[in-house]
Image (spheres, rainbow, N blue to C red):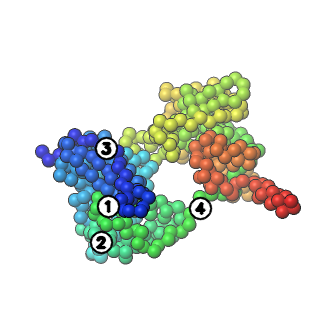
Amino acid sequence: MNASYDVKFWDIRPNKSTKPGENRKTISYTVRWTVAAREKSKTFRTSAQAKNWLSDLRQAANKGELFDLETGLPQSMLKAKEARTVYDFVRAYIDMKWPHAAAKTRDSISDGLATVLPALTKDRPGRPDAETLRKALRKYALLPEAKRPDVPLESKQALRWLEGASLDLTDLNETKTVRLALDALALRLDGKAASANTIRRKRAVLHAVLEYAVELEELPANPVHKVKWKPPKTTETVDPRVVVNPRQAEALLTAVASVGGRGRGRRLQAMFACMYYAALRPGETVALRRQDCHLPATGWGRILVDVSRPEVNVQWTDTGDAHEERGLKHRGRDDVRPVPIPPKLVKILRQHIDEFGVAEDGRLFRSERGKVVASTAYTEVWQDARALALTPAQVASPLARRPYDLRHAAVSLWLNVGVPAPDVAERAGHGVDVLLRVYAKCLDGQQEIANKRIEDALAA
């Protein structure tokens, strides 16, 4: 047997410069591990590269993969190492990445790769149309083999063509080849320009795949860095036009209770209140349980947010559930975020529990059938509430167009009334630098304060 489960890992070793006169700076980082007591190592230029490699190895070991005695690589990496075409390499990358990626991350990876793979092909007859190729990739090819459903004839033919036409992996060393992929990211299927955020997200997927090829020494360097290609600038800041004031927020929450058949709006009123008064993300709100809430008879309460259930297509989840449970965004799996909640929200939640009770697992918000509330259901209620609470001009505007905009309104309000940024960031689950960057345009009155301070300084 040329493989073993007996794998051990050592800490990453920084390598110091030995040149005379230098200040012994770190010049590289070495990952070391053993397979059946045989020592293996790989050296990287940066600490991040070394950590990524070690993480990939550890994840493969935790998944129970056999490690090859000769190369020291797990089976998933060997598959990528043996790939000769871009198409085969990408499929091996999916197999490696899938077990430890969130469902939304899997969806994003597939979306990006389904865009670039058709561009990285030879000019061969019988090319399927773009929509057929994308469907074959998204629904079948870019899934791990165990998750792949039976492939219909049309998709089989499309994938057979793609497999034969795919460029060799070594072709990616040519700048003109990588430019083909980058240019493909900038367009939608209908030929129109893609949004800046979509281009940025898909470029990150392409970059990660090529970095993996570099790690496996299939490419000498990431070819993306050689291409003089600039993606359009993305907008990270929240549009202040979407932010409602407290009076508008209350009007919307009141309207929610009056819309939707069979009392659906009233059942969802407290859920929207959590987004506004506690700045919870929708995925955090639908996962909220009674045991996470401290709801005193008077005064402020508290919510402990420790899980999120973002909605995604079931083909990307392990459970077949569209709301797979995940840890908090940008935090460790076991992290908990305490959020103080005002008496008004405490009262709303107490009334909701008295009227509707909770699910068997303690969830506060559920559909009439006890399921996790679907985004289509609460978005429909929200649009009806907007039509009821806002003027026609406001309905046609971006104002609170999405339920998520209630969270934006909450964070903007906290910042504008003078709550310190670190405290706001802790409540909202942001980093302080990201918080101030994202909400920069929603800070009312800050320019006047700055102008007054400058004026006073000049007068002195």
Alpha carbons under labels 4 and 3: distance apart: 42 Å
Instruction: Read off the residue under disc 3.
Output: 10
The residue lying at 20 percent from left, 42 percent from top is 37
Q: Which mark is residue 235?
A: 4
Q: Disc 2 or 4, which lies upstream in sequence?
A: 2
Which secondary structure lies at badge 2? helix
Which secondary structure lies at badge 1? helix
Q: Disc 4 or 3, which lies upstream in sequence?
A: 3
Location of residue 435 with respect to 280 vertically, above or below: below
Residue 143 seen in render: no
Alpha carbons under labels 3 and 2: distance apart: 35 Å
Q: Which mark is residue 213?
A: 1
Residue 168 in the image: state x and y as whole percent: 26, 69
Residue 134 in the image: state x and y as whole percent: 37, 62
- Please state which of the two labelled residues, at mark 4 or mark 1, is closer to the viewer: 1
Alpha carbons under labels 4 and 1: distance apart: 30 Å
Instruction: Read off the residue under disc 2.
Output: 171
Determine whether, in the image, residue 407 is placed left or right of residue 53: right
Alpha carbons under labels 1 and 2: distance apart: 12 Å
Mark 2: amino acid:
Asp
Label 4 with label 3: CB-CB less than 8 Å: no
Q: Disc 4 or 1, which lies upstream in sequence?
A: 1
Q: Residues within 10 Å of mark 3 (few under 14, many from 20)?
A: few
